[in-house]
Amino acid sequence: MRLSRPKAARVLVALVCGGLGAACDETPTAVVESSLEGVSGAGQSAVVGAMLAEPLVVRVRDASGAPVAGQTVAWRAAPGGIAPASSQTDADGLARATATLGPAAGTQTFVARLGKDSVTFAVTARPDAPTALAIRGGTGQVGRIGQPLAAPYVVEARDRFGNPVPGAEIAWQAASGEGTILPAGATGPGVTAFFLLADGTGRSAVVHTPERVGPNSVRAVVGTNQATVRFTATGTNTPMLVATVPIAPNYGIHDTFVRDGIAFVSAWNTGLILYDVGNGVAGGRPAQPVEIGRIVTGSAGLGGARVHNAWWFHNPVTAERRYVFVGQEGPGIIGSSSSGDIHVVDVSNLAQPVEVAVYHLNGAGTHNFWMDEAAQILYAAYYNGGVVALDVSGTLSGDLASRELARTTPGGATTYVWGVQLRGGSLYATDMLHGLYRLTLTGGAFAVSGGDNVPERYSSDLWVHGTYAYTGTWGTRAAPGNAVKIWQLPATGAPTLVDSLIVPTIGTVSDVEVSADGRLLLFSAENGSGAGIHLYDLATNPVRPQLVAAIPVGTGVHTATLADIGGRRYVFAARNPSDPALLIYDVTGLP
Amino acid sequence: MTLRWRAAVSVPLTLAALATTPVAAQRSPLAVGAHAVLGWSTLDPAPGGARANAVAAEQVFAMAMLRAANGLFRVVAMVNLEGATMPDGVLAPGAFGEGYMDRRHPHTYLHELVATGMLPGQWVRASLTVGKGFAAFGSDDPMNRPALRFPVNHHWAQILERLTAVLGVRAGPLVVEGSLFNGDEPDAPDAWPNAARFGDSWALRLTLQPARGLEMQGSRARVASPEHREGSGPTSWKWSTSARYVHRWSGGPELYGLAEWARTTEADGFFVFPSALVEAQLRTGPHRPYVRLEWTDRPEEERTLDPYRSVRPHLDDALLGITRWRIQTVGYGYSVRVAGTTLEPLIEVARASVGVVGGGIFAPADFYGSTTLWSATAALRVRLGTPHRMGRYGVLDESGDATAHSGH
């Protein structure tokens, strides 16, 4: 801090100033060799615009170190203020000034000068209290209702000078009925309001989950003046494609079975492929399926695995989840012949499935399955073979011919059963030529009612929920277009047709399913201009489905299934060749 | 449609006109030709029960044949423009294949482009042909035969538009050919053979030419997944045998006759499709009456909302049924030459009866409204040059009757 200057220079300054009679600021009252040093006031802190609590003090000493009185010290401030502009040293050689901070938060400096000597005082200017908020991102997004938006809402708290205010207390609140919020990075259930302290940059961020279709808003408030900003997102319930999993074009996917976050994809000659889509075993999720394992089951002399469908058996008796039943679809003539066996795959090690048993029915091939898991019975649609019930209790190995419990051909010699489903103790079966049957297995034999109730179209898949059944139709028979048939299921006896949902632009309704809560009807459309996925609201009236979404898929969808994973609802759809893929849509919130 | 006809006719004609050598020079170093048929057809009943009428430019092609080194090196090329002139196919009772039903499909734009190298010899000669073209299997392509409408058995009795290599050996009147090729058939006019599948299919043909004008052949082929391009479809095993006879009276009429039998099995014999066919033609002066009798089984596949199209690619191997087609066809053409161009007005009438073989859900009476279908065609054929017999390469092309027997 002590600064020495050549004596000649000081003399020269004194002469020049004195000779011109000018009022030189730095004109010493006497020409002495002196130095300037800071004494106190540096390092103070105050909010922007405020006066520092302590004065800034410097001392002037001569060459011997003795205080020099009567010296004029000049003070300079930028951008704040300082008073007086200059001051005289007292008997102790001290000169003082009072500083006022400028508007910019951060380090500010003040300078004392004596001749060429100067002392700089650095002080800290703190932001003032928050009086405003600025949106720094996140507003204006479009997102699915019930699902966190992709990007957080971010605000910045500012004081009256526009300085960010770290630590500002910001109140966040979602508008009533318009969703929930969580601090960015936090997990758990969302809430509708909370306070959040701004980070070191004055910012605060939350993630919004819209609740309703249309605008959903969240506001942030700060300061005693209640400065407010509002974020808005548009909530939508339009299905959103979250993943596309390409499948080798070996006829593509025929069916997908999803249970406990694992998707069993039946990919024809590529085999059965297992994906973690939320189970956690391989870190997969619906938006990012992770393959766990795969198996190419036996060809049974049919020229390929021809994996068509699968069912993962959760045995409540043994608590085992050991077996997957795989349907093989061989060549056939609809209404007349078919081929293909049931292959049993041991998935004790999901990464290394092993085929352990097979069931073969001469002269017929299997199609869709359903299980009475508590009774350990597998029901299999068997096309011209009708319906077969198999005992699948205990250990399964080798030929399962001896496991056959019962078999029936509900449509007689021309039966051609597409699918079966157990509900309320009855087994419902769709026969392509004869329509919907109700079967009851009693004492090793099936009692049959219904049938011959869809004469104008070929029936396809079915789904039963509560006291209603929904069946699809296939191809072209006598009537144009295709349909979803809606049935009332009385406590006993044959199903009663109550309505038909005609879809003239669809070549085939190839898969039908109702959500577990009964609110949503899903069916897939194989071809035609309406090819794709169709979703209907059943919540309003289960016999009057209302279209809520149609997802066009140009090459058609062979099958589709619903799965609830992690509190959200997804559709897993099999896109047809020539570019086959497993398509996964988030349909949470529908209807 | 008018523009399409114009393009269809004008392009081959232009190609022919640009050739530097006269047309119809079968043994000239370069021979070129062009061909088109513009016709009106009716099918009654058509799918749905009503009568269907259509105008189409079909068999629109241009060809070139080059011979070099005294015929030891040969190139055959044919460009077919049906993909542009009849993208929806052409009405034809019983026709099927490549996603078309009751309409004959258009061929690929590059129908044939093969190169042949000959190995000369005194008693035994050999040839190797490579390129895109016919496998060594079956009888003549229908475009080389009298009737305009293709027979139902086109896909049972010929294997074409493949990436193929044909090795042929001739010993006197006997020719043995073996060929490797890709099993996939085209699925669009601009489709190219799946080269990765070259060699997954083979065919053998034994041809005997014991006397002038008489030719007999027997063929066997294994065709892997013909209807599924990536190769997951069932394999076809095919038989074909035929006898062909052409007799020309000196300075007088010419008699042509063909009898053939073919059989294709698919999916290890799960599906069986037999076929038998006889046809004859008498050409005398400008007159060309002809007749064809056919008996062929065809698969009934799931159709799209377009009743003339079936689902492609296949989603499984299920059929709606198998139908048996008995078709009697008669026709008559009258040729005139105008400025080096042959013009042939022709009429052709066919009666088809269709029944069901075995079970299935396809009911012809429901689908067509009748089990008897009538077809009629009135057309004008335009030809420059002499088309070659397609699919006959190397040693099979060096003797016997090399002339096609349509209106050509």
Image: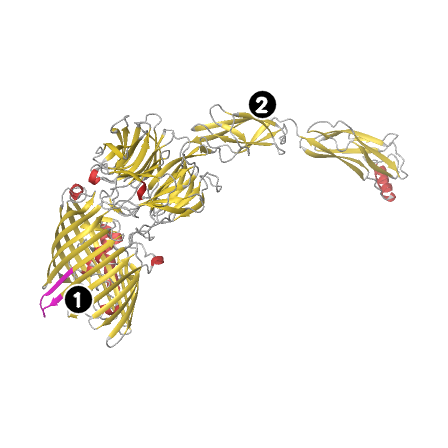
Please identify the dominant SS of the magenta region. strand
The one of B228 and A273 positioned closer to us in this rendering: A273
B249 part of magenta stretch: yes
Quadrant where the image shows the C terminus of chain B: bottom left
The residue sitting at 23% across, 55% down in the picture is B264
Residue position for label 2: A226
Q: How many marks?
A: 2
Q: Residue A86, which numbered label? A: none
At label 1, the amino acid type is Glu
**Above or below, comparing residue A9 to residue B115 in the picture:** above
Q: Residues within 10 Å of mark 1 (few under 14, many from 20)?
A: many
- CA separation in Å, label 1 and label 2: 101 Å
> Within the image, what quadrant is residue B17 found in?
bottom left
**Above or below, comparing residue A316 to residue A398 in the picture:** above
Q: Position of residue A298 (x, y in %)?
A: 35, 49
**Above or below, comparing residue B202 to residue A297 in the picture:** below
Q: Position of residue A216 (x, y in %)?
A: 47, 28
Colouring method of the image: secondary structure
Helix, strand or loop at label 1? It is strand
At label 2, the amino acid type is Gln
Residue position for label 1: B215
The one of A117 and B310 positioned closer to us in this rendering: B310
Helix, strand or loop at label 2? It is loop
Q: Which residues are magenta?
A: B246-259
| Eye-nearest disc, 1 or 2 | 1
Letter of the chain that mark 2 sits on in the rendering: A
Q: Position of residue A358 (x, y in %)?
A: 34, 46
Q: Position of residue A336 (x, y in %)?
A: 22, 44
The residue sitting at 79% across, 38% down in the picture is A118
